[in-house]
Image (cartoon, grey):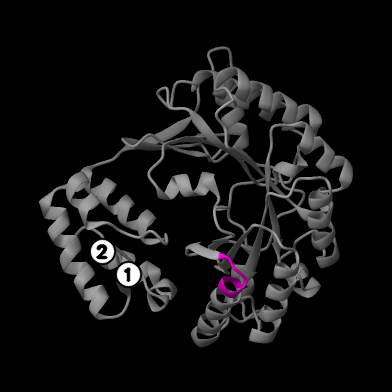
Amino acid sequence: MAGIYIHVPFCARRCAYCDFYSQTDRSLTEDYVRALLQEMDLRKDYSRGERVETIYLGGGTPSLLGERELTAIFEGLERHFGLSACREITIEANPDDLRPAYIALLRRLPINRVSMGIQSFHDDDLRLLNRRHNAHQAQEAVANCQAAGLANLSIDLIYGLPGQTLERWEANLEAALALDVPHLSAYHLTYESGTPLERALREGRVQAVDEETSLSLFNRLIDRLEAAGYVHYEISNFARPHREALHNSGYWADAPYLGLGPSAHSYDRESRQWNVASLPAYLAALLRPDGQPLFERERLTPRDRYDDYIITRTRTRRGLSPTEILAQFGPAYHAHFQRQARRAVARGLLMTDGDRLRLTRTGLFISDSVMVDLLAE
């Protein structure tokens, strides 16, 4: 399975916690679409003949694109890659963009899944995060999508916000469950360097929640969603049975993917490459007469491949397979993994599940440190 990720670098305004590449000046939207179509043409053979089965429009805020831009993008995708094999085509959307007319547009396009950045159902949280919607708009957007037959929805929540209590988080979870969506992603707030929220933390204007509170919030998240019938299939992701996100699951299962747009990453199992994280530079490189993408690339060593396996598989419910490690990476990496995994099992961080190993509840909370111990020496 191959996937395509398209980075849409435009936002109406920047969220206080976000460090993804984006800009609020949308005057270059038309040039962006022209350059994107040019990049599609130049890189149409990247997947080496593998069928494209998932497409994901992320950002930024892809729901700022209108009918003309989205139609041109999907015509380009059909022309260069074909859409007949696509099982999942996702667009990220802000709740306040999902008015009935816009949802009707999405229904006319090949899009069959919407990932909605709700983050919280408390308006004061949304103001702190500099989100441009309110809780009512989020609930209305979900209802509008469902009424229009666009029911394959995922919503994002953030926990660990400054001052967040278990009671407030419980209220968020209750509101989310009431929407009855098939997929939910929940991420602990990270204070990314250079973001407004990180500056507020550094200057003492907000205070991070303590570790005990973080653990309580995470445990409540798992307990409430599993009790409601969701499968906790990846550290931050929950789905109704058989409703996992196919595109993101491809990342965790070593599927190749093509990244289009400024700052987008690509992977072909032998190398990784990433486009320049600058819209003006991206446009200048592609829109000249002899235009070519501007990117950097790294060739993956056996150690890189092993470490990628550890990082991606540890995140998932399927976990890690000693048999796969031996077959793919050889006896030396297998011996190292077995030694480190035994220690993690003894500490209650990994558990055996048939012929595989996966994180325990304790291990989930400190998954980064578990991964580090399993990485190559």
Residue underneath mark 2: 374
Is-magenta flag for residue 33?
no
Q: Is residue 61 above or below residue 286?
A: below
The amino acid at mark 1 is Val
Is-magenta flag for residue 229?
yes
Which of the image's four quarters has the N terminus?
top left
Q: Is residue 152 above or below residue 344?
A: above
Element under label 1?
helix
> How many numbered marks, from 0 up?
2
Q: Nearer the viewer, residue 123 or 198?
A: 123
Q: Is residue 57 above or below residue 43?
A: below
Question: Measured from the top left, where is residue 121 in percent x and y?
Answer: 76, 70
Res 78 → quadrant: top right
Res 334 → quadrant: bottom left
Q: Nearer the viewer, residue 241 or 136?
A: 241
> Seen in the image, is 303 located left or right of residue 349?
left
Which residue is pictured at 71% across the width and 24% down the height? Answer: 72
Residue underneath mark 1: 370
Question: Measured from the top left, where is residue 10 in percent x and y?
Answer: 70, 43
> Seen in the image, is 333 located left or right of residue 294?
left
Highlighted magenta segment, given as a residue range: 225-230
